[in-house]
Image: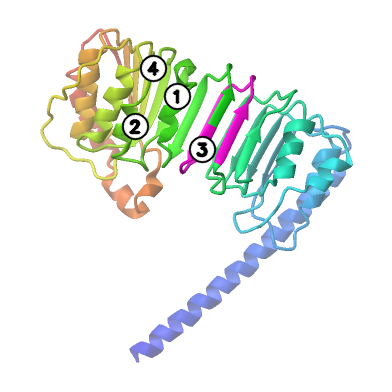
Amino acid sequence: MKDMERDINRAAGRQLQMAMEIMYDAERQTYTNWINELLSSLKSSTLQGLKFWFHVGTGCDVDKWVHFAIQKKVQKLELYFGHTFEYVLPLHLFKLASFNSLYVLCLKFITVTKEMLEYLLCCCPLLETLSLVNSGVPKTMKVSGPSLRLKCLELVRCWELIKLDIFAENLVSFKYYGSYLDTEFKSVPSLVEATFGGSFVEFTRESFLPQIKVLKLDITQNEPEVIYWLSQLPKLKNLKHLELIACVDDGITLGACAMLLKVSPSLWRFTLKILNTKPTFRTERKFSMECQCSLKELELVGFCGAASEVELVLYILEHAVELKKITIDTRLPTKPKLKPLGEHFKTWDHEENRKRVRKLQEKIPHWIEFVYL
């Protein structure tokens, strides 16, 4: 009898799933038809921006949308057709007409061939931002060109990438999330903002780090070895804003913060985004690592009052004698998906966290502005 009930439930579940898929496909086709009608009604000769950012059906002809963007001399083009839709950016369409209007190109789950990349860098003279997320790319990327105006380059989870060569004198911002990467920054005199994440910790060797003014690091995937690599950092003499995403624990995050503060003598603002997957509320201990910094503003996001969080605040109070403002955000952490959703919401007590903030506030000198959310 139990086996029969289980089989009936499974059959009913499959039928419900099929019905939902049919309904979803119908809605998706309706939306696709609406897009086609909308595009055909546009009479202007140029468009400032065009964004296709939804899951398309397997039979959808997206080439005509890309061709439309080229014909309309779009300045900003964003493409994402779903993670299951395999699409290679078509070089032949780009060659049909000059695409010298393109300023920004953002691609997600779209393959860019070596030839396509070379065309973008050489034949799109106004291109300033190139963002590739979860995209197929050549194993070796060379970002250079005699008239290259590229200012922002983002490479996020492009797993095929092994080697990156950059000669880009106008590059201002660089972002990389991924695994080990053989890099060579031959000439990046304008680079002032850098973001690193994933398991890539060798960024500490990059020669351009001393010129960086804004540095964003996600060390959630490379603890505890990140402590060794952070100890190899040169002096970040121009760094003004540091943002760190980390999992709070009883030592690694505190050590990482102390090392970063120690090599950042000109730091103005420090933002720590905390992923409290397993917070502990033991008695606070004094963290000992000598460090003097000129920090003016401290911001903690995802604060729940764990012992290591309180220790960090007290440590900064002791060593940042010029501190003027502390902002504490007790709302949900940056990446709740790292923990099962149901469990995460059960353990995240916003009101209880705010009570812990008010208790911490008692330890803050009155001349420091204290804000909590």
In this figure, what is the number of numbered marks?
4
Q: Secondary structure at mark 1?
A: strand
Residue behind mark 4: 269
Viewer can see residue 188: yes
The residue drawn where x is 18% and y is 25% is 359
Residue behind mark 3: 182
The residue drawn where x is 72% and y is 60% is 29
The residue drawn where x is 37% and y is 16% is 235
Placement of the C terminus among the 4 image quadrants = top left
Range of residues picked out in magenta? 163-183
Placement of the N terminus among the 4 image quadrants = bottom left
Label 1 or label 2, whichever lies nearer to me, is 2
In the rendered structure, the answer to whether residue 356 lies left or right of residue 233 reads left
In the rendered structure, the answer to whether residue 82 lies left or right of residue 159 reads right
User: 10 Å neighbourhood of mark 2: few (<14), some, or many (≥20)?
Assistant: some
The mark nearer the N terminus, 1 or 2, is: 1
The mark nearer the N terminus, 3 or 1, is: 3
Viewer can see residue 50: no
Q: Which mark is residue 229?
A: 2
Q: Secondary structure at mark 2?
A: helix
Q: Secondary structure at mark 3?
A: strand
Mark 3 → mark 1, Cα distance in angstroms: 20 Å
Residue type, numbered disc 2: Trp
Secondary structure, magenta segment, majority class: strand
Residue 164 painted magenta: yes
